[in-house]
Amino acid sequence: CIVHKNQGMISVGAIVDKLPPGPKRLVTLFVHGLVFLTNVALVVWGIQFAIAGIPRITSILKLSYFWIDLSIPVGCAILAYYSARFFVMTLKGEEVKEAALEQKS
């Protein structure tokens, strides 16, 4: 989630960076929208998966698998939030800060 928040995900930026501003913005909106929709779907499916794990109990901790499986929808909800935020920022024409890939000394 922190990597996504700081725009550090792997992408094909070399191709997109060569596009003119208009198409570049459209591609960026498409990508953020697609990531958002995918994560929303994973939240829904993750909740269903977690609920299905309620009867299963871990052998050592005696803990329901629900709590373990709940990490899927929680993580995807966080990613969906940031994707929606980046989508709106791009739509407004604001700059989305990207992660620095290397430190400059």
Image (spheres, rainbow, N blue to C red):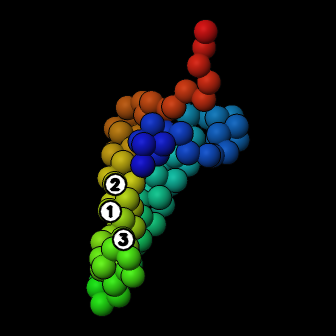
Of 99 and 91, which appears nearest the observer?
Answer: 99
Residue beneath disc 1: 74
Q: Any mark on residue 16, and which?
A: none
Q: Earlier in the sequence, mark 3 or mark 1?
A: 3
Label 1 amino acid? Answer: Val
Q: Of the two numbered discs 3 and 2 on the same chain, state the one appearing first in sequence.
A: 3
Residues at marks 3 and 2, CA–CA distance in whole angstroms: 17 Å
The amino acid marked with disc number 3 is Ile
Q: Nearer the viewer, residue 10 or 92?
A: 10
Q: Is residue 21 above or below residue 74?
A: above
Q: Is residue 2 left or right of residue 16?
A: left
Query: Can you tell which quarter of the image residue 101 is in?
Result: top right
Which residue is painted at 45% across and 66% down in the image? Answer: 38
Q: Is residue 75 above or below residue 10?
A: below
The residue identified by callout 3 is 68
Q: Residues within 10 Å of mark 3 (few under 14, many from 20)?
A: few
Nearer the observer: mark 3 or 1; the answer is 3
Residue 43 appears anywhere in the view: no
Helix, strand, or loop for circle 1?
helix
- Residue 28 image offset from top left, x and y in percent: 52, 46
Which of labels 3 and 2 is toward the front? 3
Q: Amino acid at mark 2?
A: Ile
**74 relative to 31 in the view: left or right:** left
Report the residue marked by disc 2. Answer: 78
Q: Could you tell me which secondary element the residue under label 2 belongs to?
A: helix
Q: Quadrant of residue 92?
A: top left
Q: Residues within 10 Å of mark 2 (few under 14, many from 20)?
A: some
> Marks 2 and 1: CB-CB under 8 Å?
yes
x and y, in percent, of residue 20 in the image: 62, 35
